Image: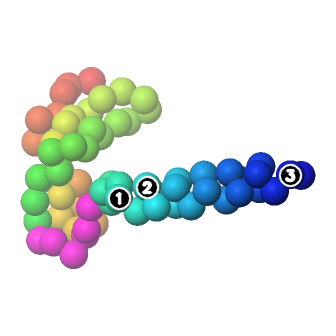
Amino acid sequence: MSPVGFAVGVGLGLAVAWATQALPQVRGSFDEGDHHEMAWTVLAAGQVVCVAPFVRPSAREIECRSARPS
């Protein structure tokens, strides 16, 4: 391996590591109280049941108020 290739590899690795730190965290925090999760879609057997469910983290419940009949 040439020194130039090694330097390029290290430089690209550092650039990717630095860039990924700037990305927002995708997961929400369940430390919050009851709330709507607007970005969630609830599936059952691969079919959409509802979108934007009401979430109760303390009770570990997801309520689909806009449930579609099956």
- Reading the image, the residue beneath label 2 is 19
Q: Mark 2 is on which residue type?
A: Ala
- Reading the image, the residue beneath label 3 is 2
**Real-space CA distance between mark 2 and mark 3, rounded to the nearest whole angstrom:** 26 Å
Q: Are marks 3 and 1 in contact (CB under 8 Å)?
A: no
Residues 7 and 47: in front is 7
Q: Residue furthest right?
A: 1
**Real-space CA distance between mark 3 and mark 1, rounded to the nearest whole angstrom:** 31 Å
Q: Mark 1 is on which residue type?
A: Ala
Q: Position of residue 35 (x, y in %)?
A: 10, 59
Whether residue 27 is visible: no
Instruction: Identify the secondary structure beneath mark 1.
Output: loop
Q: Are marks 1 and 2 in contact (CB under 8 Å)?
A: yes
Residues 10 and 19: in front is 10
Q: Residue furthest top?
A: 70
Whether residue 52 is visible: yes
- Reading the image, the residue beneath label 1 is 22
Q: Are marks 2 and 3 in contact (CB under 8 Å)?
A: no
- Disc 3 crowd rating (10 Å Cα; few below 14, some 14-19, many 20+) is few
Residues 1 and 20: in front is 1
Q: In the rendered structure, which disc, 3 or 1, sits on the residue that comes first in sequence?
A: 3
Q: Position of residue 61 (x, y in %)?
A: 24, 60
